[in-house]
Amino acid sequence: MSPSIRPVLRTLRGQAASDGAGVKLTRVIGSPQLPDLDPFLMLDEFGTDRPEDYLAGFPEHPHRGFETVTYMLDGRMRHRDNHGNEGVLVPGSVQWMTAGRGIVHSEMPEQEEGRMRGFQLWVNLPAREKMTAPKYQEYGPERFPEVDAAPGVRAKVIAGDVAGVRGPIEQPATRPTYLDLRLGAGDRYQHLLPAGHTAFAYVYEGSARIGDGEDAATVQARELAVLGEGEAVVLEGREADTRLILVAGQPLREPVARYGPFVMNTQAELRQAFEDYQAGRF
Ligand code: FE
């Protein structure tokens, strides 16, 4: 029997936003039109050739209660935290940072010219893990398998698996899938996802037909497709060198109390986060 195909529930375009010390970006999830997509709290695309749009970077700021996932496509970003961790994210690298009970860090461009491009995704943690010890899963481009997923379809596996090849990132709480797919016009790929997982595709170059039959939608570059229930996602490139990310994860279905860089379950926990941060307990 062929698997049921996930429908496209809606498509939307990100909104221009500014964050950090004035970095210009596109907020796709985490804005009024789509406040969250449990367990995903935010998706930003940053992409610019203009140094004035990124040079200010993201100076020192805290996080508690969730994970930040940075996927660099172009450019170099230096991160440094209050626990003594430091490194440079190069093109093709991914940093999956579990902020847990708290980190204070900066994310600053390690370049003064050229293109800076990538994504930052925020993934929620369940209540039982919000105060876990901070942790990094950070890998260079050579650590991510690239797989010929179907004729004309190339998949970089960040998390989850394609044709039995598993990406290096593991998060048992939300069991994420994070694939970067490249496909040409008419190239088609069907990807099975665990039942019940929230899923979205974000096209960042070219355009793609996503879904099947009446439930399909043509998704242009810089548009997000929110996927409904089903067993498989079906994607077909509409242009040469269409590129998209396909992301999925287990929803947490817990109350979300959120303020800026703190994401907890209750207002009392949010107040505690502020107090702990101000008292230097991160
Ligand atoms: Fe940050």
Image: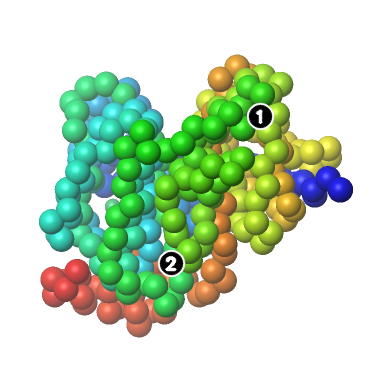
Q: Quadrant of the C terminus?
A: bottom left
Q: Quadrant of residue 102 in the image?
A: bottom left
Secondary structure type for disc 1: strand
Q: Residues within 10 Å of mark 1 (few under 14, many from 20)?
A: some
Q: Are marks 2 and 1 in contact (CB under 8 Å)?
A: no
Name the residue rendered at 23%, 62% in the picture.
103
Residue 82 circle label: none
Q: Is residue 151 above or below residue 147?
A: above
Indicate left or right for 208 with 6 as reference: left
- Residue 245 in the image, given as x and y percentages of width and height: 53, 38
Question: Is residue 201 at least partly visible in the picture?
Answer: no
Q: Is residue 109 above or below residue 252?
A: above
Secondary structure type for disc 2: loop
Q: Tell how many labels.
A: 2
Residue, far right: 1
Q: Could you tell which of marks 2 and 1 lies nearer the N-terminus?
A: 2
Q: Residues within 10 Å of mark 2 (few under 14, many from 20)?
A: many
- Residue 201 in the image, given as x and y percentages of width and height: 59, 41
Name the amino acid type tagged 2.
Answer: Leu
Q: Which residue is mark 2?
A: 125
Indicate left or right for 99 with 212 as reference: left
Whole-number angstrom distance, CA of label 2 to CA of label 1: 33 Å
Residue, far top: 240
Which of the pair 94/240 is nearer the observer?
94
Name the amino acid type tagged 1.
Answer: Ala
Q: Which residue is mark 1?
A: 150
